[in-house]
Amino acid sequence: MATKRGDRVERLTNLLALLLETPEPLTQVQITAELAPHYPDGARARRGAFERDKAALRDLGVPIDIETVDAGSEAGSSRYRIQRRKYELADLQLEVDEMRALQVAVAAVRSGSSAGRDAIWKLGGELSSGDRLPVSAVVPDRPELPVLRAAVASRSPIRFGYRGESRHVEPYGLLLRGGFWYVVGHDRDRGEQRTFRVDRFGSDSLEAGEPDSFERPPSFDPRDAFPADPKQIGHAPADGVEAMVRIDVTRAAAIERELGADRVLARHPDGSVDVTVPATNLAAFRSWVLGLLDHAVVLGPDDVRDGIVSWLRELSGRAAS
């Protein structure tokens, strides 16, 4: 029998209260036993219902801390709780004009979710129909944002899939650029700072680790950390994938100015040039090449060239069908 919406709301409310009140983190088995009347029978069904409830709370922006049991009969299992200092807003003591300014800002920006409205309510304000201004900006929403914001605030490392690899990152900050969200932080596997586009994370791959696990550099500013070259997002020159591209005379001078003279490998009598271009981030490289239309030809390496040719043939086949 399907769970009624009222029962689900009551269960989520009780789960939130339990995780807020518990003095010690609880395992999933302990939680579902404590709230037994609200969860279905059977270990598998209970775990599935709990995972859905946990995801629902996180989608609402609730910061759930997770730790792994190191020893004993439950070694390797996870324990959960919510720390009040992370969940509850301190009294911001906003003046009337400050609250009004915040209301106007929320009214003028559409986020694609109820986050702005809920934030105003949590701050003690409200938005009446008379406060509805014409929308002057649209901020894209992503299901990963609540987890990422909580990880940045609590200094919790994150793990996610990105271009077929598992990445382990200390998230320093979030940045909105060109209609897309990016997370900037220290890539533990590569030992350097990287930038990743959030909508390219692997499906359901994002996980946050223990809070207070790293220190953000005092001078960090996500605006300064964003790569000037979008082809380097998620990668670095040290990754080593470089493509050779021939640019015809029409665009040669402009591309040399863009890339720098040190990336020109050869100059030809007809005015065309061969240049090296970062291509580890294949999607960004492909977009750059396509932007040049018939003024650019990818010469190598073979796997990069073959990948672009195959992609173009696939697009051509879709258009013809």
Image (cartoon, rainbow, N blue to C red):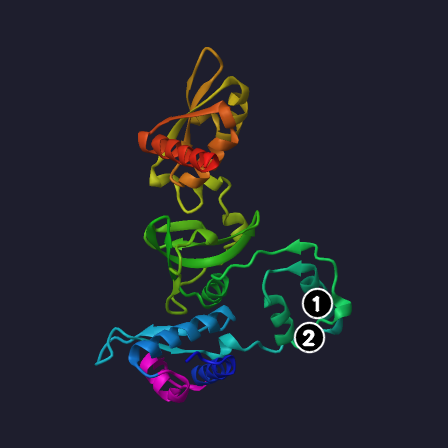
Task: Decide which of tag 2 and tag 1 comes sooner along the chain.
Answer: 1
Q: How crowded is mark 1: few (under 14 residues within 10 Å), some or many (20 or more)?
A: many
Q: Nearer the viewer, residue 139 or 174?
A: 139
SS of the residue at dot 1? helix
Q: What is the number of the mark on residue 103?
A: 1
What residue type is disc 1 on? Gln
Disc 2 to disc 1, C-alpha distance: 8 Å
Asked if residue 189 is among those painted magenta in the image, a careful observer would answer: no
Q: Give the range drawn in magenta.
A: 21-40
Q: In which quarter of the image is the N terminus?
A: bottom left
Q: Which residue in the structure is indicated by mark 2?
A: 125
- Identity of the residue drawn at 24% across and 76% down: 75
Q: Position of residue 69 (x, y in %)?
A: 28, 76
Q: Position of residue 302 (x, y in %)?
A: 32, 29
Picture quarter containing residue 34?
Answer: bottom left
- In this rendering, position of residue 83 left or right of residue 159: right
Seen in the picture, residue 273 relative to 40 is either above or below; the reply is above
Tell whether label 1 touches label 2 (CB within 8 Å): yes
